[in-house]
Image (cartoon, rainbow, N blue to C red):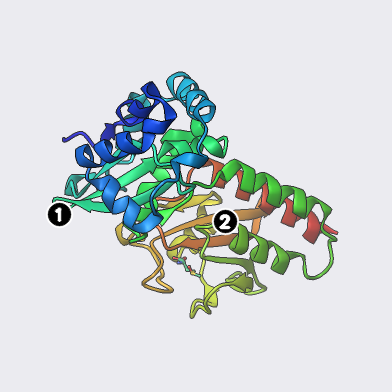
């Protein structure tokens, strides 16, 4: 398999060896060497070197050498080789520096797509230690057809939601409020809803945010929701096309996570989340949503 991570950070910082008055010239030379920089400039504009400070680049370079290992980035991507469809070999990632605050941008070079990963922008946001995750995330978004974006820190988002919900009054709008905040704050949660087991022992749709669904009642064992209730465990399906026992709500949905809500070890309902991205979920989503479900269980108990 071909190398999918090209690292050009140190080469691009060549201008640091020159006086600041020379930076613009050096940048011109870099553009001849790396033609993708011209493409990036078409979208983001030319960097204004007058406004940039040497000490920031020096600090960046120091942190970069401490924090960024190319191997761990490639490893993180290859671990998800199947979900990210790496066999197609239709793109590479290019680690570089572009002094504008956009973390990644897709450009074309020789009919190949290049995801330019702007490590400088990531560093400015204090997220350079998350570079492997950021590269992985950019590929997930690229696979959906997005051409530019910024890294989001899952842990921070989940923490903020937990803090908000801890203070939220436990009134009858509580479950709707959970759906709303999850849908609004997590960029890849595209449908959030609760199914509760009704008197007939069937999962019945309760509060939700997102497009209406025809699956208002789901039997235990049916679809991903029914399986999670049946097996009493969290289900993560990273690519719904590969799941045979699946009830489709919309062709836009590419992945799904379902977490049961327990009371006295019995399933009383569940939270269901659909995403328009392939493979966006991981253990952190599972842990976070299991926490939300236990919050809901306590709320329903009162
Ligand atoms: N896809 C689910 C059905 C519910 S909708 O996603 C809202 C399933 O397979 O159980």
Please state the horizontal and vertical placement of residue 187, each as a whole percent of the image: 53, 57
What residue lies at 36% left-to-right and 72% top-to-bottom? 251
Mark 2 near ligand 1 (CB under 8 Å)?
A: no
Find the distance from the CA under tag 2 to the CA under tag 1: 33 Å
What residue lies at 30% left-to-right and 31% top-to-bottom? 7
Position of 145 with respect to 100 (left or right) is left
What residue lies at 29% left-to-right and 41% top-to-bottom? 93
Q: Quadrant of the C terminus?
A: bottom right
- CA neighbours of label 1 inside 10 A, class few (<14), some (14 to 19), many (20+): few
Please state the horizontal and vertical placement of residue 23, each as a whole percent of the image: 38, 34
Classify mark 2: helix, strand or loop: loop
**Can residue 181 be seen in the rendering of this structure?**
yes
Q: Which mark identifies residue 186?
A: 2
Quarter of image, res 172:
bottom right
Classify mark 1: helix, strand or loop: loop
Please state the horizontal and vertical placement of residue 22, each as a whole percent of the image: 36, 31
Please state the horizontal and vertical placement of residue 26, each as a whole percent of the image: 31, 33
Q: Which residue is mark 1?
A: 111
Q: Give 273 or 157, whichever is nearer the viewer.
A: 157
Q: Looking at the image, which residue sits at the far left?
A: 110
Q: Which mark identifies residue 39?
A: none
Mark 1 near ligand 1 (CB under 8 Å)?
A: no
Position of 298 with respect to 38 (left or right) is right
Where 289 falls versus 66 (above or below)?
Answer: below
What residue lies at 25% left-to-right and 42% top-to-bottom? 31
């Amino acid at each position: 398999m071909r190398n999918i991570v090209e690292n050009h950070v140190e080469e691009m910082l060549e201008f640091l060896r020159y006086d600041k008055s020379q930076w613009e010239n050096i940048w011109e030379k870099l553009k001849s060497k790396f033609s993708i920089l011209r493409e990036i400039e078409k979208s983001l504009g030319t960097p204004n070197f007058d406004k940039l400070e040497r000490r920031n680049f020096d600090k960046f370079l120091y942190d970069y050498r401490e924090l960024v290992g190319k191997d761990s980035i490639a490893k993180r991507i290859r671990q998800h080789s199947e979900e990210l469809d790496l066999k197609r070999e239709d793109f590479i990632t290019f680690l570089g520096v572009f002094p504008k605050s956009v973390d990644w941008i897709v450009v074309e070079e020789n009919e190949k797509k290049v995801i330019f990963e702007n490590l400088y922008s990531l560093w400015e946001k204090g997220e350079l230690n998350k570079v492997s995750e950021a590269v992985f995330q950019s590929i997930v978004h690229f696979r959906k057809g997005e051409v530019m974006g910024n890294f989001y820190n899952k842990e921070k988002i989940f923490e903020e939601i937990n803090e908000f919900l801890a203070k939220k009054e436990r009134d009858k709008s509580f479950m709707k409020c959970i759906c709303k905040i999850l849908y609004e704050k997590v960029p890849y949660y595209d449908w959030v809803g609760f199914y509760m087991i009704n008197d007939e022992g069937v999962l019945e749709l309760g509060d939700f945010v997102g497009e209406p669904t025809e699956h208002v009642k789901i039997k235990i064992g049916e679809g991903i929701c029914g399986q999670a209730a049946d097996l009493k465990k969290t289900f993560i399906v990273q690519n719904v096309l590969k799941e045979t026992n699946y009830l489709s709500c919309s062709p836009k949905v590419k992945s799904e996570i379902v977490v049961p809500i327990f009371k006295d070890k019995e399933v009383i309902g569940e939270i269901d989340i659909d995403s328009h991205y392939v493979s966006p979920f991981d253990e952190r989503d599972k842990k976070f949503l299991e926490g939300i479900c236990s919050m809901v269980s306590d709320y329903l108990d009162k």
